[in-house]
Amino acid sequence: YRRQRQMCIRDRSDETKNSASLMGRFEDCAVVSTCEPFHLYGMLWRLLYPMSLKMPAHSITIRDPETLIAIQKQNQKVLFITTPSFIEAVARHRELYDFPQNVAAITTSGGLLKEKACADSKEIWGAIPTEIFGSTASGGIASRNRGVSPVRRKQDIGIQTEYTGSRHMEGIEDEIRI
């Protein structure tokens, strides 16, 4: 059983290398998460990424700001794995909390990160989240960090998929890498 588990982790090294190239290497951080490890996003970022880099990862799933603050106080730096909805919920009541400023980076997935939530995250934790789009068994499909200046184009870029309908074109201003 142990050998199979090690092989499984080793087989996922490409995904964790992709995660490390996207986020950087945070070996000196403890990973804290509001996401369960049985979701693909939680599995990749809360389990596989820290295991591949031999980072400490807290087994407690963060459910409330008080628990997050307590864990932040126990660690010098943290990598925070969360969702846009958690950021928005904390932002609504931010005056009630005094968060330590030791968040090295934040990833979000599971919904659209609104501009306001992005700004709130920067104000509350001192970090702009990297959004992960489409977590799959082979890693994230795409990502965005609004704190990094996108390459500006002379024309708008649009995305159209079968899921948005044939007449709907979603306009974006970010860089697209294919």
Image (spheres, rainbow, N blue to C red):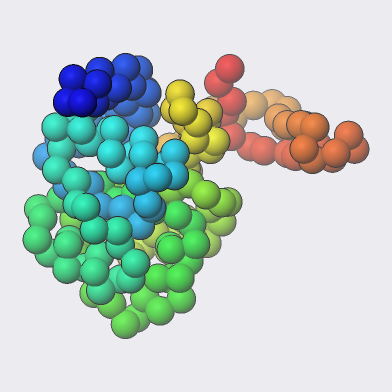
Residue 164 or 51: which is nearer the viewer? 51
Identify the image quadrant of residue 163. top right
Residue 114 lies, with reference to residue 93, above or below; the image says above
Residue 92 lies, with reference to residue 2, above or below; the image says below
For image coordinates 53% across by 28% down, the residue present is: 141
List x then y, in percent, for residue 72: 17, 61
Q: Quick one: quadrant of the N terminus?
A: top left
Q: Quick one: quadrant of the C terminus?
A: top right
For image coordinates 9% across by 61% down, the residue present is: 74
List x then y, in percent, for residue 20: 30, 27
In the picture, measured across the screen, residue 103 lies left or right of residue 40, that is left
Identify the image quadrant of residue 99. bottom left
For image coordinates 45% across by 70% down, the residue present is: 89
Identify the image quadrant of residue 115. bottom right
List x then y, in percent, for residue 123: 36, 63
For image coordinates 36% across by 75% down, the residue present is: 94
In the picture, measured across the screen, residue 27 lies left or right of residue 121, that is left
Residue 6 or 69: which is nearer the viewer? 6
